[in-house]
Image: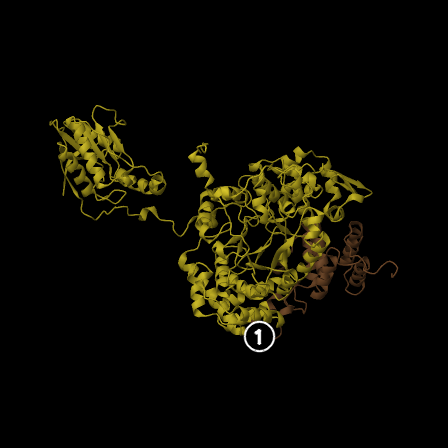
Chain colours: A yellow, B brown
Amino acid sequence: MNEVPRRSERFVAREARELRKELLISPWPELGLVAFAGPNDPRPELVVEDGHVTRIDGRGADQFDVIDHFLALHGLDLDAAAEAASLTDEELARGLVDVDVPREKLVRLSRGLTPARLARVVAMLDPVELMFALKKLRARRRPANQAHVTNLKENPALLAADAAEAAARGFAEVETTVGVARYAPLNSVAILVGSQTGRPGVLTQCAVEERRNLQLAIQGLVTYAETLSVYGTEPVFVDGDDTPWSKALLAAAYASRGVKVRFTSGGGSEALMGHAEGKSMLYLEARCLATIRAAGSQGVQNGSISCVALALSVPGGTREILAENVLAAWLDLEVASGNDAIASHSEIRKTAKLMGQFLPGTDFVTSGYSVMPRRDNTFGGGNYDADDLDEWLTVQRDWQVDGGIEPVGEEDLLEVRRRAARAVQAVFAAFGFPGVSDEEVEAATHGSDSRALPDRDRAADVAAGDRVLAERISGVDVAVALADAGFADVAEAVLGMQRQRIAADYLQTSAIIAPDGTVEAAVNDPNQYSGPGTGYRLEGDRWARLSSLPHELDPRALGNGHDASAPPVLVELAEAERGDSRREVVIGVGPAFGDGLLETIDGLGHEEVLAAVVAGAREAGAEPRLVRVRRTSDVAFIAHDAAGLSGSGVGVGLQSKGTAVIHRADLQPLDNLELFGMAPLLTLDSYRAIGRNAAGYAVGEPVGPVPTELDNFARAKLIVTTTLLHARETAAIVPNAPAVEVTLA
Amino acid sequence: MEFDSKRDYPLGRRRPDLVTTPAGLRQEEVTLDALRAGTVDGDDVRATAETIERQAAVALAAGRKPLAENLLRAAELASVPADTVLEIYTALRPRRATAAELEAWADRLERELAAPRTAAFVREALAVYAHRGLLAVDERSPAQV
């Protein structure tokens, strides 16, 4: 009979982890399943004859595909090309990480590089160099973030409340989409009203089909678009039903209506769509980015985006994605750096990937942070969501890095959410749309997700959406409705967004709008990082704001059993002398034990603890005696001093936080008989057993060590409390004072 | 005062005198009271072609030539009806328009819609599409042509 080979239990356990739901594959370059250096990636080449580009990356003009043609006509600055031709790849790559080579120079050179050269140079950088290059090359000085706001029920009160929360948390852009296309106008109104309730100046978009999107923009209901997808091979571009010319025309159409435009591209999309032509993800993305720049887009949403899990399936995927972001920034494009689609089942893995963008900072660290719980994210995104907010804020605080999200307390958030829901309720009432009930307002304010919201009449809602388009209800109409309903400040903010359309300043690279209406873009707030002390630094008021989380505590205000007014549980008597009984066990307590501090870290009363040790010692035949060691707060020395006073030479040391040691006078102070460092896990029974064992050592009975437990998280959980308790004990030290006899009060 | 593309950004703050709606209203004239009084039309609260051209100049001064060219095309399209713009977009999608149809659009952009840059852009696409087989096939047989 064949036995099933015995498995390693550790391998089996690892296979059950979330990470292993994802496939890792070895590269298959012919399908484009390779991060860098595909077998068909061309050697960099640029030939210019009579002022015309005649060869790009291995192809002559007669072999150009639609992308090559576009780049030859719009994508290469021939003066810069001449300058770049005199530099080696190594010189260019070194420049990317050299604080003394200014961004302007690198950007100028990038305009003369073909996609193959761009990819080859950036591939030379290791992960830390890529991060440094990204920090240096980002277009706008200050990083920011974008939020996703959607819900499965397309409930307007919840959309408004979530948009308001996003705005109040500092997101510079809010993106929504629709499950049903006809909802687009209502959803756009909801996030416009909500976002401007939370913070004036937030840009909004509704990701829908182009014609509908353009109409929403014309009516002043949305202000940006990032749905313009670009691909790195001609067959995929054409399968996407566009060409570089059609996309560029669309970009101009949006700009003509005052819409900020950002294109979208990302490694792996060509492989997913079946026409990678044997080329690497990074090379194809370089073609996309060169096309996007040539089309006149101010920016791009890139870094694999919805294909992130495919890029992560191959070796070097995370590095490749970061290299994509660096390329985009090098080409002087605003970068919204993905991190929206779920990158991994593994929290460790996805956050490891995030750090590539988070630490250097990008124009938008995510191109969609899910402000609501993931289940309501109809983009299929939610890589980071409402449940992860405290982690995100904490990691910002840990690294002193601005990831574009601000902490806001619960009460403030409830208020802003309710106000936004009320505002959209008023707007719906003003236009005669299906009513938003008070119940919906309250559920949108307090609920976790759309399950908390009652179902709406969806047929009536989409009919109202149709009315927005048919009656051309515009952003200014919404502002008037808000003002009439008493939401003067929200009305003014919505009107402010309409006024922004007149100057159209937000069409410039990396533009976001400050609460006072000032446009901050790469033009007037450029990133000029040139080494330590320069560029954007998280400090001053902003650092104070991002570092003080609502659940941060003032350690001075922490009680931890400290009550100076409570009567001490121990009474001090005369100076302690050395005892002469061979059965004696001296129990030494710390300077603040039972006087100032009244309980252990686990909340056991000092009186009960001491009683337990005494009882344990007695029942094992010893004569316990209590002293207070005043000269030290260190448990080893407390115990050693106690042992020195003990007639048997055996003593017990007890710190106020509960840590205990059984000691013997003839041992070195830092040696011991038994140490009980896990104070949080000690019970009164443990202390009783400690007393018994000490007695056993004193009277010469065989002693088995007191069983102790191990909690690997105890330190992470309690180290702050430990420190604070120990600080109080240390503060109670009387230098050089002899131990004194004590008795329970 | 002359417009200075290097110094006058953001226009809304630095040169409010230069930015108006197509009907000539300045930003501060677009108020709730004016809207209620009906002196401002919602669809009219947008940038003029001149403002978008100035944004193109700002982009160019910052070294962003393709962005500037895009904004110049946008300035041309600012006064073209949205439906027409979307028709041109559709014609530029792969295999939607024949050579003659794209040429007709280019001609119309140039002569009728005062959009010579966009016209040139369409003609450029036409030449490339012909090379790459991205034009619509004329459904009439050669004999009928």
Looking at the picture, how far across and down is residue A654, in whole percent? Answer: 23, 36
Please tell me which residue is depicted at 33% across the width and 42% down the height of the picture. Answer: A718
Q: Quadrant of residue A226?
A: bottom right
Q: Quadrant of residue A568?
A: top left
Residue B4 is left or right of residue A16, and the answer is: right
Viewer can see residue A370: yes
**Residue underneath mark 1:** B36
Up the image or down, A564 lies above or below A691; here it is below
Residue A393 is left or right of residue A560, and the answer is: right
Up the image or down, A714 lies above or below B8; here it is above
Please tell me which residue is depicted at 31% across the width and 49% down the height of the picture. Answer: A557
- Nearer the observer, B40 or A386: A386
Please tell me which residue is depicted at 45% across the width and 43% down the height of the picture. Answer: A398
- Nearer the observer, A99 or A593: A593
Q: Name the image quarter holding the N terminus of chain A.
A: top left
Viewer can see residue A416: no
Up the image or down, B14 lies above or below A398; here it is below
**View extreme (top): residue:** A666
Three-letter amino acid code at the position of disc 1: Arg
Circle 1 — which element?
Answer: helix
Query: How many circles with numbers are drawn on the protein?
Result: 1
Q: What chain letter is assigned to the residue under label 1?
A: B
Looking at the picture, how far across and down is residue A512, in whole percent? Answer: 57, 55
Q: Quadrant of residue A408?
A: bottom left
